[in-house]
Amino acid sequence: MTPPTTEELLAFLEEQLSAERMAEIEQALRSDVDLQQRLAGVVRQHDPGAHSVGAIWRRRRLSCPSRSDLGSFLLGALEPIRTEYIEFHLRVIGCRYCAANLSDLEQEAGDQAEEVTRRRQKFFQSSAGHLANDEE
Ligand SMILES: [Zn+2]
């Protein structure tokens, strides 16, 4: 990919680039130490309180996937590139906000599974009851 200019890195931080370019830069940041340092430099210049890309990322929840994306991620229903990005976001960036969101969704999915089981049991119980009542 074309290395991002300083202006682009700034736009990246402000999330003002196209989704494709955002993804490209995020992908590159994963392995490109130079780019990480450049971004950290841009961050420091414009936000002197931040000392690392990780810190700014966590603070600004940069490019957090949406809750519905996280839901699809759980179901394994995302395109590979989105899945890869969310894994990167959770494991490498260590976004606590998304991790909390994800465990919340997992909990919800678990509750739903229980609800389905309960409804199924109720259905069978009531049809058994219905059969018993037929004799009346
Ligand atoms: Zn996040």
Image: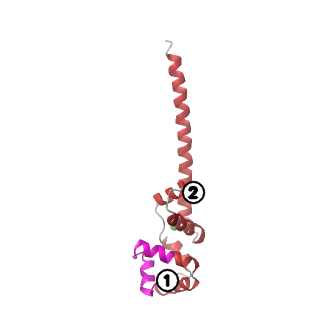
Q: Which residue corresponds to mark 2?
A: 103
Measure the C-alpha gap from mark 2 to mark 1: 30 Å
The location of residue 98, given as percent across then percent down, is: 53, 63
- At horizontal 50% and vertical 17% (from top left) the residue drawn is 133
- Label 1's element? helix
Residue 122 pos. (x, y %): 53, 31
Closer-to-camera residue (48/103):
103
Q: Quadrant of residue 104?
A: bottom right
Describe the colour scheme in one phrase.
secondary structure
Q: Which residues are magenta?
A: 1-26
Counting other residues with Cα less than 10 Å from the Cα at mark 2, is it few (<14), some (14-19), or many (20 or more)? few
**Magenta span has 19?**
yes
As drawn, 132 above or below 2: above
Residue 43 - label: 1
- Residue 73 spot, x, y in % from top left: 52, 58
Q: Amino acid at mark 1?
A: Val
For the point 44% across and 76% down, the residue is 21
Q: Is residue 34 above or below residue 128?
A: below
The secondary element bearing badge 2 is classed as helix
Q: Which mark is residue 135?
A: none
Q: Main secondary structure of the magenta part?
A: helix
